[in-house]
Each structure stands twice: as C-alpha cells, then as structure tokens.
C-alpha cells in the first residue's frame, strides 16, 4: 500500500520543473520562501541548475551579482513563484524583470488557480486569468523598457537593479491600457529593447509548509491564509476565524474570499495527490467549503482511477478552547518562545481586508552555540570569491557588495530555521517531536545528539545538557553542516526550555488546570480564580519575566479561556452570560483596574483610541502618588463648599480640581463602556454550542471519552477521531454527496439504486483540515487517537489554514482582526 507523503509530493512537483530552472534566476515571494524552507527545497533549486534564488519583495545588493559573469548581450531566463494573487505580485514581478539587462523568458508559477483569480472580489482578471496576465505583463514590461531606453546614461549606480522605487505608493493597475501613464522612476538599463519577452503563467498548487509528511499548514503570507474567513455580522467573532456555527448554510455567492480560496486550494491539492474525495464537514464555513469542492468535481474526476480518501473539514470555532490552551507539545513551546521572522512590507489586495498571520519562519538563535565560527570569516571568504570572479565591469559592483557585510549583524548571519526534511535514518527530526510530548521529545533529541557525536567521534558526558552537546557538534564548519538539522532543532528546544520560557509555559498549564477544575465546581469558584489572576497580573508585571508570573496580556488570555469553560459548564447561570451579575461585576472591575495600570493594553481593538488618555492618567497618578481610584476631592462636604464662598482665587483652584476630577470620571466611565462591550463579546464566545448538532456532538463525545477528568482533558479533534475510528456515528457531521451520488439519488434512486452513505472510517486515507488553523497538541492527540484505535490500515493527514499559538488566538479574538 502506497503511503501519502505531502513532503515527497511537493518535492517531486518541484523536480518536474527541472528544465525551467536550468540557467534561470528564481524569485520566491515571502510565502513561497517559507514553504521552500520547510521543504529544504532551496538547495534543490540550485542542484537543478538555477543561477540564483532571490527574494521577490526584498531587494538585496547581493542580488545584483546574479548576472556579472554573463556577456553584455546575454538574455536572462527568469522564474517566479508566488502564493499571492497575480494582481498583488505584479509590481514586484515587474520590478525584478526590469532589474535585468534583457529578459527572454519569464515563467510564473502561482498557487492561486484561474478560477480563484477570476472569482476574487475586485480582481481585474477574468476567467482566462493566466492568459490575460501574460499579455498584460509583456505589455507593461515592453512599455517600461521603451520609456527607459533613452535614459541609459542617467543615474548609473544610484538605482541599479531597482527601476521601480521600493517606496512607490499605489499599485500598478492590471488593466489593458492605451496611453495610460507607466511608472515614472529613475532607471538604469545597460542594454536595449531587442527580442520580445515571452511570458508563461502556470498553476502550482503545492505551496504549503509541511511540518512532517502527515501535517501541513498554509504559508503565512499567502492570499489563501490572509483572506478573511468571515464578514462582520452577528455570528462572526474575527475575520481570521469562521463564523460561530448556527446551522445556517451559505450559498456560493455569499461566501467570503477565504472560504472560496480554501476550497480551490483543497480541490487542486487533492487532485495533484490523485485522491478521490468523500467529503464530510463540521461547522457552517466547513459546510460551505465542502459544497464548493463537491461542485468543482466532475463526472470525469469521479470516474478516474484515483485512490479513495475522506476529507473531514472542521471549523476552528467549534473548539476555541484547545487553540487558546497551552498543551504538552514541544513544537507549540518552540513557536511560542523562539523569535519569528518579520513580515515583508508587501501589500495584500487593496480591495479586501487581509489578516496579518504570524510568520512561520522561526529565527533559531545560533550565535551562542557556534561562537567558534566567527561571522567575519564567512564574509572574508565571500569577498575572496567575488574578487576571483571574472566579470565584465565588476569592480564597482564588488565594492558595493562587499560593503553590505557591514550591514549584517552576528544574529542575522547565525539564525537557523526548522526544516522538515532533515532526518535521522529516514525519520524527520521535526516529525519525531510532533508525535511525542515535551519530555519524551527532549529525551529523544538528546539521544539523537549523542548518536551524532558518536559518529563524529566526539566524546561528551551523556548527562550533559543540550547546550553543551550542541556546542560540541559546532566545533568545525564541516561538522556543523553535516549535523545542521539536529543542531537547529536542538537549539530551538534549548531556547524554548530555558528557565524563563519554561516557567511561563508551566505557569499557564497550572493556571488552566485550576480554571478547569474550578469550572467543574461552581461559577463563583471560577470567577474568583479569574479575578485573582487578573489582580495578580497588575502587581506582578515587573517580575513576570523572571519568575514566570503572568503579564496583563496573559491574564486576558486566561480570561478568555475561563469564559469558554464557563460557557461549557454553566450555560444558564446568568441571564445573558455564564456568570451571575455580581460575579461578572467583580470581573469587570478587575479588568478596568488592570487597564488603568497598564495603558499598553490599548493595542486591543476594544480600547482603540484610549492609549494617550490612559498613559496621561497613569503618569498623573504616579506624579501625584495617587491610586487609580477617583480622588477624594471629587466628593466634598457642604461645609467646605460654603466655606469657599466669595473667595475668587480659591474658586479658580477648585474649578481646576473639578475639571481634573471630571476628566478622571469621564475616562473611567468610557473605560467601563468599553469593558461592557468586551463582555458582550465574551458572551458570544460562550454560545458556541448554540447549534443543536454541535451541542449534541460535544455532549456525546464528553460522555463517551473521558470528559469528566479535568487533568486529562483532550481536544475536540482527538474525541472526534476516536469516535470515527471506532465506527460510531457523529452527530452534526454532514456528508457531501458526490456528483455520481447526487445522480443516483435524484435519478436512479426511484428504481431502488440509491447510493449508500459512506463512512469516514471506511476510508484508508483521512485528510483532516481545520479551517482557521490548528496547533501542535492537536497533531499529537490525533496521532494518539489513531494509535489507540489500532487501525494500522488508516493514514491520517492533518492540515490547517495556519499554525496557531495561544498568543495568535488572543490576537485574533481581541486584536485588529476581531469583530468585538
């Protein structure tokens, strides 16, 4: 039986393009760069004959070295990979094309299908999107080259390789134009317009970030992951999350762009993997995606000889609690602790709002473990290499390039990243950590490090910590390169398990257990625990980093967690929410005090516009030595007022004091109104089980799979897979009939030839995709559910819109993407 391996599928698709890469300059946008880093595909591009691999959005002085060894009449072949809409990438593609002397062939691979381009709201491209864009790109390129052909001698070095300024405002419009203004900018062209450039546009759907052969997410800076999943309405909580499930079905005309693009991606991904799908969904947005994928299938697709597979679509909003919790997963710890790369300055669609997903590019700090390899040595070798390169007129170029070394810091030169293809005896390192809990993953990494040290004939105490073992493997550059996979993952683990980060994570785990246990008692116990956490966070802010105490942002996250738990356990305690009026009043007052003490909380959407007022109020309180309470001058006795009668100067002072008091009162009243809106929003989160099907599902899962033990709480995905693999019915799970199935049902069904509804457990391959994103603990629990079922004949492939950390969830729920 052939196993499904998303990594091999991606790499095989890249290798199929070997003829396109030969003698070509390859440009990757930010999302494709993330994908190719996880795949370890950057060296493969060079092995297949690429001259260089460069960034599409970010110009580097090093990029100008690409064509130095070419003759002045040589023509360049350029290949672009993008996971954005072509209209969004156009200005960058045109800028990179005009940076070369002359381009003979331009090939563009985009992960967005033609249907996805034409159906996107406000898209300038129609049903024949690829052909239209080919013509428009050639037209723009030729017009631009003609206009700049007469300016060959102007500003030689100032804007070399950057004919369109990086700070140019606006977008180059993708509409056929006659006489329209082309971009005006200083230029440097070393050749002239000759042979017409040929452009090709192809669909390349396999732009994904695979953590393992069985788990992937979408790139953080791609149009699919950035497109909004829900518009602002009653049942929406965030543009980056699906709607709360209410049983409402959404027709194709009403679906948000993120839903349409996700359905297009899943259809083409599974088609590329030769999978024939039986589609099931849980949640309103998943139901809409399932319908769109079913409508895209044709009789030809159904009749082809493909491997049968089940596709299970799940809305993230069906289980918000797991995404907000801190689970026993090393990968979750790494992504929550290790610094991430910064997002590029690339703009998304100007017609639709985009969700700024957290970058997946983990910047593993290696400077401390490879101190024996000074970065200056690398730059000196690079300089020597450049001086030895025979090239026409390259003297000034070499000088400008060597000087770029001064701009690189040690940290920039010595940052690592996670690669899913680095392995030990065929077992990828990253996959081995996904399948184990934190302690077991750390022990395994130590064993792998000791094995690597033994092969390198380096003796180290087996009881030494990770840092000592990593440094031993970095003694020489050759040893470092041979073992870079295990070194980078071990360095990320060492950073995530350092005292500061470990203490903070463990504190979260303990607090969540306490909230979970309190939720099993009474609403009063739970609300008092939440108030205690909020109050302590106000006074422990300065010591939180060193002692593992919670910051106020952490307390907000735990408040959201507590409210979701309250909604599950006390759905009818209050008239509008899970808590009584008094319990909720104490929570509100604690949050108001926390905000007054921490103006930085104004970054959350429900406090927009209050930062300056909160900052001024805190400064005034500190200067006067007062507390956040309303000053006592606000309430004066009648005797004091009559005593000041007729004294003008004292009256003036009194008026000023009253103005300050009124300002304080006004701020606090405004703040209370904002906090009231926050709690109305939290009430919405507690009604996640409003859909009858979802409510029946969750109650049945909790009653049958260890739902009573607060210490062994499992996520919904684990309970769902356990029930499916044991061949039990799942309430609320909808099956999407295929084209042939609908034909049998509507036509041949009258003759008793109706199609039997298939079961997910009958499929040898089950692809689970969580709309809105998933985290590492869910991957681990899914593997545990499969292992416990004893179904060795089934493969479970997991995927999600993005990789979520608890901080990401807090940002989605309370940040700029929130519909609070």
Image: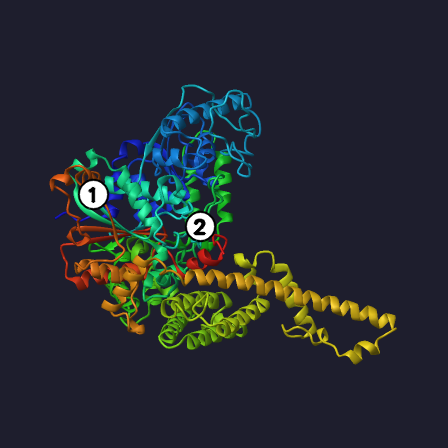
Quadrant of the image occupied by residue 304:
top left
**Residue at position x 28%, y 38% in the image:** 295
Can you identify the residue that label 1 sits on?
A: 275
* Residue 150 place in picture, x, y as percent: 55, 21
**Residue at position x 39%, y 35% in the image:** 119
Cα separation, mark 1 vs mark 2, equals 31 Å
Can you identify the residue that label 2 sits on?
A: 239
Point out the tag, 1 or 2, that comes first from the N-terminus: 2
Q: Residue 224 carries which label?
A: none
* Residue 488 place in picture, x, y as percent: 34, 57
Q: Residues within 10 Å of mark 1 (few under 14, many from 20)?
A: many
Q: Nearer the viewer, residue 683 or 221?
A: 683
The image shows residue 45, relative to residue 711, as above or below, that is: above
Asked which secondary structure carries label 2, the reply is loop
Q: Residue furthest front?
A: 750
Asked which secondary structure carries label 1, the reply is strand
* Residue 256 place in picture, x, y as percent: 40, 44
The image shows residue 428, relative to residue 59, as above or below, that is: below
Quadrant of the image occupied by residue 117:
top left
């Amino acid at each position: 039986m052939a196993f499904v391996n998303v990594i091999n599928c991606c790499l095989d698709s890249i290798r199929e393009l070997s003829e396109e890469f030969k003698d070509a300059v390859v440009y990757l946008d930010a999302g494709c760069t993330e994908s190719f880093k996880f795949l370890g595909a950057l060296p493969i591009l060079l092995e297949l004959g690429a001259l260089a691999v460069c960034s599409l959005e970010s110009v580097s002085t090093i990029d100008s070295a690409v064509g130095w060894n070419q003759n002045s009449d040589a023509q360049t072949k350029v290949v672009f990979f993008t996971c954005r809409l072509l209209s969004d990438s156009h200005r960058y593609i045109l800028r990179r094309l005009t940076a070369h002397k002359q381009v003979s062939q331009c090939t563009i691979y985009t992960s967005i299908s033609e249907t996805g381009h034409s159906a996107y709201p406000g898209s300038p491209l129609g049903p024949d999107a690829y052909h239209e864009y080919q013509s428009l790109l050639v037209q723009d390129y030729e017009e631009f080259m003609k206009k700049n052909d007469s300016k060959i001698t102007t500003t030689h070095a100032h804007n070399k390789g950057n004919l369109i300024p990086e700070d140019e405002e606006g977008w180059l419009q993708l509409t056929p134009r006659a006489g329209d203004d082309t971009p005006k900018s200083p230029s440097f062209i070393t050749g002239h317009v000759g042979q017409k450039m040929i452009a090709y546009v192809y669909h390349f759907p396999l732009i994904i970030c695979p953590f393992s052969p069985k788990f992937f997410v979408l790139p953080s800076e791609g149009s699919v992951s950035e497109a909004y999943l829900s518009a602002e309405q009653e049942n929406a909580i965030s543009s980056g999350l699906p709607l709360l499930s209410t049983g409402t079905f959404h027709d194709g005309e009403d679906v948000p762009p993120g839903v349409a693009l996700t359905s297009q991606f899943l259809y083409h991904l599974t088609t590329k993997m030769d999978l024939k799908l039986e589609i099931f969904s849980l949640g309103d947005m998943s139901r809409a995606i399932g319908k769109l994928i079913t409508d895209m299938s044709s009789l030809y697709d159904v009749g082809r000889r493909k491997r049968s597979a089940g596709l299970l679509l799940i809305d993230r909003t069906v289980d918000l609690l797991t995404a907000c919790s801190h689970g026993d997963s090393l990968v979750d710890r790494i992504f929550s602790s290790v610094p991430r790369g910064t997002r590029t300055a690339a703009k998304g669609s100007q017609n639709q709002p985009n969700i700024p997903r957290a970058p997946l590019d983990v910047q593993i700090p290696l400077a401390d473990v490879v101190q024996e390899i000074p970065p200056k040595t690398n730059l000196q070798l690079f300089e020597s290499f450049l001086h030895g390169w025979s090239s026409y007129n390259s003297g000034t170029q070499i000088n400008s390039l060597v000087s770029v070394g001064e701009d690189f810091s040690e940290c920039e030169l010595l940052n690592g990243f996670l690669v899913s293809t680095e392995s030990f005896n065929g077992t990828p390192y990253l996959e081995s950590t996904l399948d184990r809990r934190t302690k077991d993953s750390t022990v395994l990494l130590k064993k792998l490090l000791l094995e690597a040290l033994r092969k390198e004939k380096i003796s180290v105490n087996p009881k030494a910590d990770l840092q000592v073992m990593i440094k031993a493997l970095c003694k020489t550059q050759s040893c470092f390169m041979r073992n870079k996979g295990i070194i980078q993952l071990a360095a990320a683990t060492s950073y995530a398990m350092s005292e500061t980060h470990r203490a903070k994570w463990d504190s979260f785990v303990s607090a969540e257990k306490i909230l979970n246990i309190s939720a099993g008692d009474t609403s009063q116990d739970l609300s008092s625990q939440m108030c205690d956490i909020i109050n302590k966070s106000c006074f422990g802010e300065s010591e939180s980093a060193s002692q593992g105490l919670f910051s106020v942002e952490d307390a907000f996250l735990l408040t959201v967690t507590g409210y979701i738990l309250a909604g599950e356990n006390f759905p009818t305690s209050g008239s509008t929410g899970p808590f009584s009026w008094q319990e909720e009043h104490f929570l509100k007052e604690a949050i108001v005090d926390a905000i007054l003490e921490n103006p930085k909380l104004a970054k959350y959407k429900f406090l927009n516009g209050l930062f300056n007022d909160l900052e001024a109020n805190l400064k005034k309180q500190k200067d006067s030595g007062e507390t956040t309470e309303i000053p006592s001058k606000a309430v004066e006795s009648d005797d004091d007022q009559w005593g000041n009668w007729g004294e003008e100067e004292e009256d003036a002072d009194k008026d000023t004091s009253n103005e300050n008091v009124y300002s304080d009162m006004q701020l606090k009243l405004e703040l209370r109104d904002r906090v009231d809106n926050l709690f109305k929003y939290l009430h919405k989160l507690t009604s996640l089980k409003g859909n009858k099907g979802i409510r029946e599902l969750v109650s049945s899962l909790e009653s049958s799979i260890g739902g009573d033990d607060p210490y062994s709480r499992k996520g919904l995905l684990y309970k769902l897979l356990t029930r499916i693999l044991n061949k039990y019915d799942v309430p609320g799970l909808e099956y999407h009939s295929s084209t042939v199935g609908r034909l049998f049902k509507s036509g041949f069904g009258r003759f008793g030839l109706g199609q039997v509804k298939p079961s997910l457990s009958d499929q040898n391959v089950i692809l689970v995709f969580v709309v809105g994103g998933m985290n590492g603990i869910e991957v681990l629990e899914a593997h545990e559910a499969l292992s416990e079922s004893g179904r060795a004949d089934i493969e479970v492939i997991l995927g999600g819109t993005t990789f979520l950390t608890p901080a990401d969830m807090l940002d989605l729920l309370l940040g700029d993407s929130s519909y609070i």
